[in-house]
Amino acid sequence: MRIEAAVLRTSDGPFVIEPVEIAEPGAGQIRVRITGVGFCHTDVLPRDKSFLAQPPIVAGHEGAGVVESLGPGVTEPEVGAHVLLSFAHCAACENCLDGHPAYCRTFFQRNLTGTGLAAGQPVTDAGGEPVASRWFGQSSFATHAVVDVTNTVVVDQDLPLELLAPLGCGIQTGAGSILLALGVRAGSSVVVFGAGGVGLAAVMAARVAGAATIVAVDLHENRLGLARELGATHVLLGSDDHIPRQLRKITGGGAHYALDTTGAPEVISGGVESLRTTGTIGLVGAQTRDLVLGPTALAAGKNVMGILEGDAVPRRFLPQLIQLWRQGRFPFDRLVRTYPLSEINAAERDAAGGVTIKPVLLPGS
C-alpha cells in the first residue's frame, strides 16, 4: 500500500515528505491510519551518529489514529476503533508480566533501533530500498503505520484523537514519573528541571498528587509562566546563579523529589544537590554525556532513579490521564499546537527554540 511519510534521510538534513510502500500487517499486528502524532525531542535522536537508530528512518512515536485492517489472528481492536499508540514491549518477559513493560527485557531493541526485532522492514521507498520503520514499534510520522496490537490503547470515539496523541509517550512519561515511579506524596516538595512537554506534564501531575511545593526550572520565561498557570508554586530561570541553594531555601532544606527532563549532567548534579536527606531525583532526559557525581553526592540516603515511560502500563494509565483531563484536572491540551505533516521541519525548529511546547503533526492535512 502506498502512503506518505516524513523520512529523515541524513543526520544533518531535513525530514522529507515522500511516497513509500507499507506492507500488510502480519500476525499480531494492525494497520492504523494516523490522524495525529506528537513531535518529541526523542524523535531527533537518530540525528546523533553514535545513536542506535540511523537514517534513513521514519520516526514518530506518539501516534493516534483509526484501525484500518487486522493481521492474521487479530480480533481486537476492531476495524474502526480509535487507538493511541505507545511504546513496544514483548508482554511476556518477567518485567512485562510484573506490570513494568517500560523495562521490557527487549525494550531498547524494540524501540530505539528503528528496526525492531523482526527481519525486514514494513516500509520501502520509491526505489524499493528499506527504510527503518519500527521506531518505538510504530514510526508514525506517516499517514499510516503498522503496529503490534500490544502497542495500542483503545479510546472512546468522542475524544479528539489528534489532541490525545502526545499521551503515548511524553505526557505519559512526565505524569507517570511523578504519580507512579516516584510516587509523590501529598504535602511534599517537587522540583522539575525543564518545562517542556514532559516537565509540564510532571508539574500538572504533582498538583494532582497534592504536592505542597512545586518548582519549575527552565531557560524560557514563557514556559515558566505557563508552569505557574498549570500548578507550579515557584519558578526559577535556569540561567540564574546558585540554583541548588535557591531550591533548598524554597523547599525548606531540600526537595523530597526532583525530576530531570533535560539530560544535562550539570543540571542533574545540581538536582542531586537540591535534594533533602533521603530525597530522590528521577532521570528521564536523554543523556549524551557522562554523569559524574562527587564522592559524597549521594550521602545521607539520596537516591538517583532512571525512569523510562513513567514506569506506566499504557492501557491502564492513559485512560486515567484522559479521565483527569475530562475533569479539568490535567489540562495537557494547553501544551499542544498542531502542524500539517508537511511542516514537520518547522515543528522541529519551533520545539527546539521553545516556541512550541508540544507540536502535533496532522498527516493528510
Image: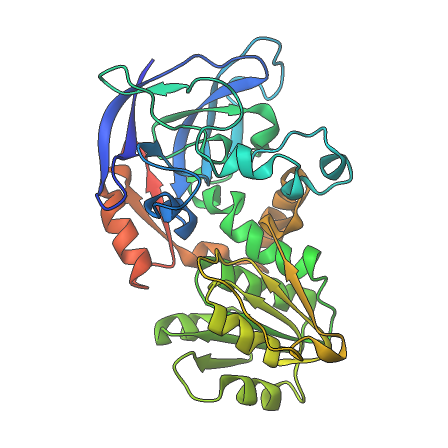
Query: What quarter of the picture does the N terminus occupy?
Result: top left
Q: Residue at x 61, y 28 (%)?
A: 150
Q: From the top left corner, tell me how far across and down residue 47 is, in percent.
A: 32, 46
Q: How is the image coloured?
A: rainbow
Q: Front-most of 308 and 63? A: 308
Residue 273 placement, left or right of 266: right
Using the rendered view, name the quadrant where residue 145 is placed: top left
* Residue 186 in sight in this render: yes
Q: From the top left corner, tell me how far across and down residue 242 is, in percent.
A: 48, 89
Residue 351 placement, left or right of 178: left
Q: Residue at x 70, y 55 (%)?
A: 180
Q: Front-most of 342 and 54? A: 54
Q: Residue furthest top?
A: 72
Q: Front-most of 19 and 81? A: 19
Residue 210 placement, left or right of 154: right
Using the rendered view, name the quadrant where residue 154 is placed: top right
Q: Residue at x 63, y 67 (%)?
A: 206
Residue 89 placement, left or right of 334: right
Q: From the top left corner, tell me how far across and down residue 181 is, in percent.
A: 69, 57
Q: Front-most of 160 and 362? A: 362
* Residue 228 in sight in this render: no
Using the rendered view, name the quadrant where residue 358 is placed: bottom left
Image height check: is 225 above or below 158? below
Query: What quarter of the picture does the C terminus occupy?
Result: top left
Q: From the top left corner, tell me how far across and down residue 317 is, in percent.
A: 65, 45
What is the tally of numbered marks visible in this picture? 0
Q: Residue at x 51, y 39 (%)?
A: 159
